[in-house]
Image: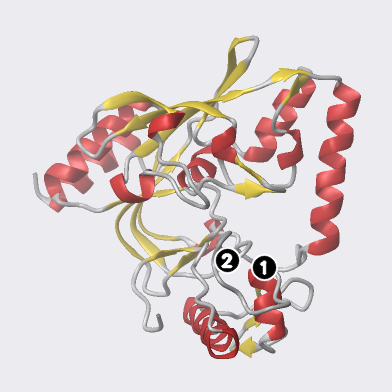
Amino acid sequence: MTRTDFATRWAAALGPDRWQPDAPLAPLTTFRVGGPAEWLADVSSEDQVQALVRDAAAAGVPVTVLGGGSNLLVADAGVPGVVVRLRLVDIDQPDDASVRAGSGVTINGLVRWTIGRGLAGVEAWAGTPGTVGGAIYGNAHWSGQNIGDLVRTVRLVTRDGTLSDVPTAEMGFAYDTSRLQRTHEVVVSATLAVSRGDVTTLRDRARASLHYRKATQPLALPSAGCIFQNPAVGESLPDGIPRSAGALVDRAGLKGAVQGGARISERHANFIVNEGQASAEDVRALIERARAAVRARFGVELRDEIVYLGTFRHG
């Protein structure tokens, strides 16, 4: 199958509403920067995911999965191949102790669904941007907990189109990491552990999480969330330096630093905000400035939490 055959087949299969060539990606990300996808496909079933991935492999077309658009930076030149948005948004409860959610379900949608049914486990994730699939890909963390701590099984599609249910022990979960970053399998759904809870108490926990985020994060401007991982436990740090990427960037003198239309947030130095006209290269250059300043000042090498899509001049 040629690339042209692939595009023709899937344009016909999905129609113009769900298959778009040269599709802008910036509006689909929380940073609001970046260039277009060669093709953008919206798929809404496991069968479609399997078939599209299989056909893309046969045609030599790269596949990139886009969740809620948070925690990533799209290059100004865009992303080659097909960018897939998974419209898998069903939620159900297989048993009293678990909830199964499609990869396209937003974390906030899952929080609302579980709270409404008096199910505890994910309420503290209220306010988390992105989708279930994206959270599992990067093993999202909040308040000392990783999403992988809640996961029981993940349904995956391999790059040859095979569907499998993988237990959490085989997912390779670690800080900001899962096996998906190596295998490039596609999440179609996940089953997470829950328990019975009081609805009022669950809502109070969710509100407390939202309040904390609003008080500590620059939510008024477009950003991608935290840029760097915190230094790992056991990693050597200078005396008196907290194990916090934001604190390191701040103490290196980069809080408030500007590059084009991008700025390191005054509220939280591990956030970069788009002040309206930022390019992806502005953001990437500012990331590298912050990394270099922390390295020079403290001898600490900050690792990316953000994911890059496409090719950049900097970095």
Residue 73 got which mark? none
Q: Which residue is mark 2?
A: 231
Real-space Cα distance between discs 1 and 2?
Answer: 7 Å
Which residue bears the numbered disc 1?
Answer: 244
Dot 1 surroundings within 10 Å: few (below 14), some, or many (20 or more)? some
Q: Tell which residue pokes out farthest to the left in this image.
A: 1
Assign the C terminus to one quadrant of the image. Answer: bottom left
Residue 50, position as x, y percentages in the image: 28, 31
In-image side of 46 versus 284 (left or right): left
What residue lies at 25% left-to-right and 53% top-to-bottom?
62
Relative to 148, say whether 221 is above or below.
Answer: below
Say whether residue 117 is left or right of residue 296: right
Point 71% across, 33% down: residue: 111
Quadrant occupied by the N terminus: top left
Decide if residue 69 is on the left or right side of residue 116.
left
Please name the amino acid that badge 1 sits on. Ser
The number of numbered badges drawn on the structure is 2
Q: Give how far across and how far down residue 278 sits, in percent.
A: 58, 80
145 in relation to 123, above or below: below
Residue at the top extreme, as displayed: 95
Residue kind at label 2, given as amino acid type: Pro
Disc 1 secondary structure class: loop
Report the front residue among 122 and 236.
Answer: 236
Tag 2 or tag 1, which sits nearer the N-term?
Answer: 2
Q: Is residue 271 visible?
A: no
Q: Position of residue 38 (x, y in %)?
A: 31, 60
> Residue at horizontal 31%, vertical 32%?
157
- Mark 1 near mark 2, Cβ–Cβ under 8 Å? yes
Q: Residue at x 50, y 84 (%)?
A: 285
Q: In the rendered image, is residue 311 in sight? A: yes
Residue 220 locus on image (x, y percent): 77, 65
